[in-house]
Amino acid sequence: MRLALVVLLVTLASQAQLAPGKSWPVATPQAVGLDAAALAAFDADIKSGKYGNVDSLLILRHGKVAFDHTYSHDYAKIYGTEAKTNGALNAHDFGGPFNYFNPWWHPYYRNGGQLHSMQSVTKSVTSAVIGVAVTRGEFPSLDTPVLKYFDESKVANVDERKRKMTIRNLLTMTTGELWQDDFPYSDPRNAASIMEASADWVQFFIDQPMKEDPGASFYYNDGAPEALAYIFQKATGQDIEEYAAKYLFAPVGIEHWFWKRTPMGLADTEGGLYLERHDLAKLMVLFQHGGMWEGRQVVGADWVKTTITPAVTVSEKTGVKYGLLWWLYPYGKDDPRLVFGGSGFGGQAPLVIPDYDIVIVVNAWNILKGPGLGARVAIDRVLAAVTDGKR
């Protein structure tokens, strides 16, 4: 009887660490094998402006919060002039949700709220929602041609290459399209900026000419995940945000979020989600533990494994790879093991370092040229603070 009780208590304690509900348990850095002085130095560099406009840094280890700081910035003052000047990052009315300088909308929803813009981390969450639907048997094969969900007579530049494009190509950014992403988002020639200024984002995406066969190479394409929102609705008969609310957010205790919509009414799955940083950490922990939460398989373990397994190499030089709308970074220069996470415009970087049981969530708003706190810096600074080696 006593043994059974001990087993039960250990199980409940483990679940409490993985699924904290309203709040994460807190520990000192030393208690979880992190150097407090190294983290203090990191904090000081952020406060000094070395990494630009960092809004928050959250670090979890062994399921406990070891570091959680926020940094205040007067964005109405910082981007006041740009907010009232039309450009690639402000293509619509000044008060609209796609004015990236408007402090009512960015980076925090409703000017100082707790929900921070995820930008392209939304893509990774979209992949997770699709994974839930795949797990539940409610989403088609990833090898289904994209054009199955379109009337070809209403699509421009249709050829055999476009007919080969599959859902998997959308998830791996290997569409084969000629998509102009070599320019910054602040440049009006950037395809994503042009798309966001258009009335129908999905039509804009599907009309683009082809450059090569799908699957031939990685090329970042903001239109691909938006097409997934459209396909999700066509294939399942359900709105992807409503599905996420019921089958992904609710099971892990995410109660508050905001999700922007395109002019055609679809959820903006390429960059429109807002989450509180601790809730974003929940999704990272969910994937860290193979899609399991409080003893419930929210996302299939096979999907999670496939998602964070390299599908394509982004850069031979840096070793960065890409899964199914998730980024994969080497631990360091001489350590090819992979950190998995999301990456969003302005400096959003939720990351999991599996072998060290570390979750990092960075939110920032560096949307014009300047220094930033990217994934590489965050990984290197946090790993440099580890004092107890691999766990």
Image (cartoon, helix red, strand yellow):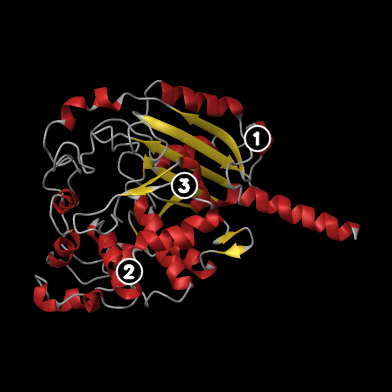
Contact flag, marks 1 and 2 (Cβ < 8 Å): no
The percent coordinates of residue 362 (x first, y second) are: 43, 39
Vertical arrangement, residue 118 with respect to residue 12, above or below: above
The mark found on residue 280 in the picture is 3
User: Would you call the spot at circle 2 few (<14 residues within 10 Å), some (14-19), or many (20 or more)?
Assistant: many
* Image quadrant in which you'd find residue 146: bottom left
Task: Give how far apart the Cα atoms at labels 3 and 2 are.
Answer: 22 Å
* Amino acid bearing label 2: Phe
* Residue behind mark 2: 232
* Residue behind mark 1: 27
Label 1: state its secondary structure: loop
Residue situated in front as seen by the camera: 250 or 188:
250
The percent coordinates of residue 339 (x first, y second) are: 48, 51
Residue at 65% x, 31% y is 28
Label 1 or label 2, whichever comes before in sequence order: 1
Residue situated in front as seen by the camera: 70 or 179:
70
* Amino acid bearing label 3: Leu
Residue at 38% x, 31% y is 54
Label 2: state its secondary structure: helix
User: In the picture provided, is 200 more to the left or to the right than 241?
Assistant: left
Which residue is at the far right?
A: 1
Is residue 17 at all visible to an observer of this figure? yes
